[in-house]
Amino acid sequence: MSKLAFLYLSHINVRFIILLVNLMLFSYDVFSNGLNNNKLKTIVIDPGHGGKDPGTLGTKRYSKYEKDIALSVSLKLGNYISNSFPDIKVIYTRKEDVFLELNERTRIANKSNADIFISVHCDGFTNSKAYGASVFVMGMSKLKANLDVAMRENAAMYLEDNYKQKYDGFDPKSAESYIVFSLMQNTYLDQSLQLAEYVEEQFAYKANRKSRGVKQAPFYVISRTNMPSILVECGFLTNPKEEDYLQTDQGQNQIAMSIFEAVKNYKLSLESSFSSNNIIDSNDINNKSENNLQSNQVVYKVQIATNLTSIFNDKKFAGIKVEEKLVNGIYKYYVGSNTDKSIVDEMKTDLKNNGFKDAFVVAFYNGKRISTKDALNLQKQNN
Ligand SMILES: [Zn+2]
């Protein structure tokens, strides 16, 4: 335990200790339930705030606040899912402008045995220049950088009656309170990261939004759900230009469509059949990859995993030539490197059939990640 953590712990009162025990029991419960199938059947969409809690007010040039935009984007997202996949059950934590307690939101998700949980929000900041969309998973690694946004979102608790009793003395604005989150087991981190990555991909490379990346922070609402969970900050309402965009039907459609596409990718990867017992034929992969490619070329790779700590030496990578890259605090693992997308597509299929069900193709140009569509266009222009 770090010195800092010890210092915090020494200040923890009895209530916190009770909360810790609860959290440990909760983690055990989550762990023993597990993901019992690989089909996406139920999705819970959680429009942030509502009723007496408006969320971020933005620049106050509009009569619609964070709660309204979150609801609108959520309903559009749910419609896209229901229209394309009528078999998927879409559950909303709220469908109208009502106030909902944070623990009620997680209760709805857990009660419905949902396969994924998506909480939809809009960002706000004191500096109006801040803009862009972020996708969060529950976590503590970059606590200082992302604590502000978690504190702001968790502060919805203050509007609940008896919040101190309900949340065992947890104070959303006190940094010390957050130590309890670090003791929680994040059972669905891998899947949450995967879903978050897909959303980020859509924002950055398809919707042409400024993406602030996949991050982690201790949001209450995604810390108690026993399923892969993400919190999406669609953009800053305190940035006039971004607020204008998010207030329009078109902007909301685009954001909802991006999240929908990500859900679709996640569903595909979840449901593609795989066997984790097969061992990758490393020769097969290595023979197909070209090394020492020039940087001014478009290069395709297969991304096979993401993790918050390095798993470079994990035995699941045994026999595979894996490349590790640290991007915005998240470790990403790539296989192969080729200018020919069809070869990398084939590798992806091999990898998916050999236990890496989340594998997908990514493109780079001058070392920078670009969309595969842009990559193909660039190659067309250069030929
Ligand atoms: Zn919010």
Image (spheres, rainbow, N blue to C red):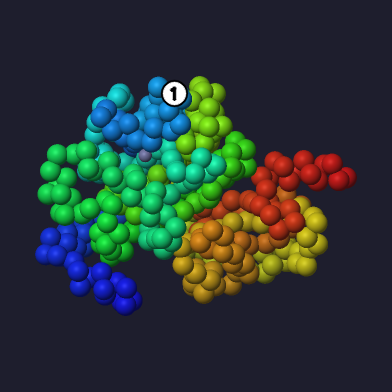
Count of labels shown? 1
Q: Give the residue displayed 58% in from the left and 42% down from the top.
A: 210
Answer with the quadrant where ligand 1 appears in the image: top left
Q: Nearer the viewer, residue 227 or 309?
A: 309
On the rendered image, what quadrant is the C terminus found in?
A: top right
Q: From this viewpoint, is residue 297 visible?
A: yes
Q: Give the residue displayed 43% in from the left and 37% down from the top.
A: 122
In the image: residue 252, left or right of residue 375: left
Q: Nearer the viewer, residue 125 or 225?
A: 125
Above or below 86: residue 154 = below
Q: Secondary structure at mark 1?
A: loop
Q: Give the residue displayed 42% in from the left and 54% down from the top.
A: 146
On the rendered image, what quadrant is the N terminus found in?
A: bottom left
Q: Nearer the viewer, residue 90 or 153?
A: 153
* Position in image of residue 90 (x %, y %): 35, 31
* Amino acid at the residue labelled 1: Tyr
The answer to which quarter of the image holds residue 231 is: top left
In the image: residue 241, left or right of residue 155: right
* Position in image of residue 119 (x %, y %): 37, 40
Residue occupied by mark 1: 62
* Position in image of residue 159 (x %, y %): 22, 38
Q: From this viewpoint, is residue 31 visible?
A: no
Above or below 292: residue 351 = above
Whether the residue under disc 1 has CB within 8 Å of ligand 1: no
In the image: residue 40, left or right of residue 352: left
User: Is disc 1 surrounded by few (<14), some (14 to 19) or many (20+) residues within 10 Å?
Assistant: few
